[in-house]
Amino acid sequence: MVFDLPGFTPEVGFEFSFPGGPRPDKQYIHLCEIIEVVPNKILKYSWTYEGHLGYTTVSFELFEEDKSTRVKLTHSSLESFSLDNKDLARKNFEEGWTHLIGISLKEYLTA
């Protein structure tokens, strides 16, 4: 899965949102704002949910390694989301990011 973000601009202050959730009838609006950019090195943004408490950050860092690039993803402060909402449990984020980075990104880059 790759999210379509029309007009996406990797600049500090740029805001974007997208829906996502465990099933079609249970979607969350993700509200994000870019908070750090180092061209070809770091992209960091805030991540909250419309109508829900909690504030997290996501960063993608790129590292040159031989003839390839390593991507380091960090999603911080997941504990700020309600522990009562099982959809926002840490294991769901781990599974989602593992799929996005380990499968979807590879498929996108080799297509």
Image (cartoon, rainbow, N blue to C red):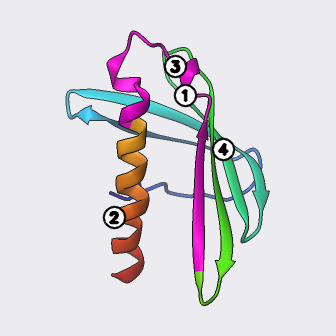
Q: Residue at x 60, y 59 (%)?
A: 72
The residue stretch that appears in magenta: 69-92
Q: Nearer the viewer, mark 2 or mark 4?
A: 2
As measured in the structure, the alpha-carbon distance from the residue carrying label 2 to the one carrying label 4 is 22 Å
Q: Which mark is residue 103?
A: 2
Q: Which mark is residue 45?
A: 4
**Label 2 SS:** helix
Please, which residue is most extreme toward the bottom here? Answer: 67
As measured in the structure, the alpha-carbon distance from the residue carrying label 3 to the one carrying label 1 is 6 Å
Q: Is label 3 in contact with label 2 (beta carbons under 8 Å)?
A: no
Quarter that holds the N terminus: bottom left
Q: Is label 3 in contact with label 1 (beta carbons under 8 Å)?
A: yes
Mark 1 Cα-neighbour bin, 10 Å: few <14, some 14–19, many ≥20 = some
Residue hosting label 3:
81
Q: Is residue 20 above or below residue 70?
A: above
The three-letter code of the residue at mark 3 reads Phe
The mark that comes first in sequence, 3 or 4, is: 4
Q: Nearer the viewer, mark 4 or mark 1?
A: 1
As measured in the structure, the alpha-carbon distance from the residue carrying label 4 to the one carrying label 1 is 14 Å
Q: Residue at x 41, y 25 (%)?
A: 88
Q: Please identify the quarter of the rendering in which residue 83 is found.
A: top left
